[in-house]
Structures are given as structure tokens and as C-alpha cells.
Image (spheres, rainbow, N blue to C red):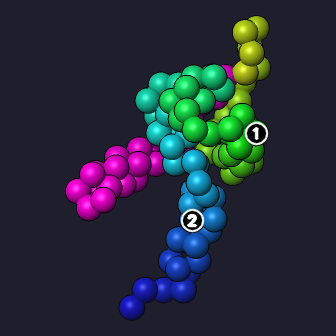
Amino acid sequence: MKSYGQFCSVARALDLLGERWTLLIVRELLSGSTRFGDVRRGIPRISRTMLAARLRELLDAGVITRDSGEDGPTYALTEAGQELMNTVRDLGTWGQKWL
């Protein structure tokens, strides 16, 4: 039987990652996007406001970093964000097969 702690961990992860657009943003960052505009071009239907909100949530959760540069801010995945690579890949594979 699964433990209550494992249930809570999944629930907390879904609170962050289960929001619409969030894993697509992670996918864009995994693909090499580093700037707000690059991420937005990779997810054309996301609004600027929603993208900014999701980036802030990922930043607050420690999944991404934001660095200010001469040409504007850049975003990068932390170690925690990089560890989502297999999850994003496997979810995409599952979606292609079953949806």
C-alpha cells in the first residue's frame, strides 16, 4: 500500500506542475529557450500575463532561476528543474500513444 507521505508528495508536485502551461514552459526551457519571448514563441497560445505568473511560480518553487542581463532577464532550470526532463519526455510519449 502506498504511504500517506507519498500521496502528499504527489499532491504537492501537482499543485505546482499540474497548472495549465507549467510543464510546457519547463519543456521550452529544457529545449534551450532562455528568454521570455523565446518561451512565448514556443507556446503561442499563452498570454504574457499567464507566462509571467507561471515563471514566478516556478521561480518561487526553486525550479528555475532568473538572471538580469544587459539584454534583459534570462531564465534557466535549476537542478530540480532539470530533473523534470524524464517526466516531460515520458508524458509526451504517453500522450502520443494514448491521446
Which segment did they paint magenta? 74-99
Q: Nearer the viewer, residue 96 or 66?
A: 96
**Mark 1, residues whose alpha carbon is within 10 Å: few (<14), some, or many (≥20)?**
few
Separation of disc 2 and disc 1 at Cα? Answer: 21 Å
Residue occupying the far front of the picture: 45
The image shows residue 84 at horizontal and vertical percentages of: 46, 48
Rendered position, 3 above or below 9: below
Q: Quadrant of residue 75?
A: top right
| Badge 2 density bin: few <14, some 14–19, many ≥20, Cα 10 Å | few
Residue 40, image x, y percentages: 60, 30
N-terminal of the two: label 2 or label 1? 2
Q: Give the residue at x 53% y 35%.
A: 43
Residue at mark 2: 14
15 with respect to 31 (left or right): right
Residue 57 vertical placement versus 48 (above, below): below
Q: Is the magenta stretch mostly helix, strand or loop?
A: helix
Q: Do the residues labelled 2 and 1 touch (CB within 8 Å)?
A: no
Q: Residue at x 74, y 15 (%)?
A: 72
Amino acid type assigned to the residue bearing label 1 in the image? Thr
Task: Examine the structure image and report whether residue 89 is included in the region drawn in magenta.
Answer: yes
Q: Secondary structure beneath disc 2?
A: helix
Residue at image mark 1: 49
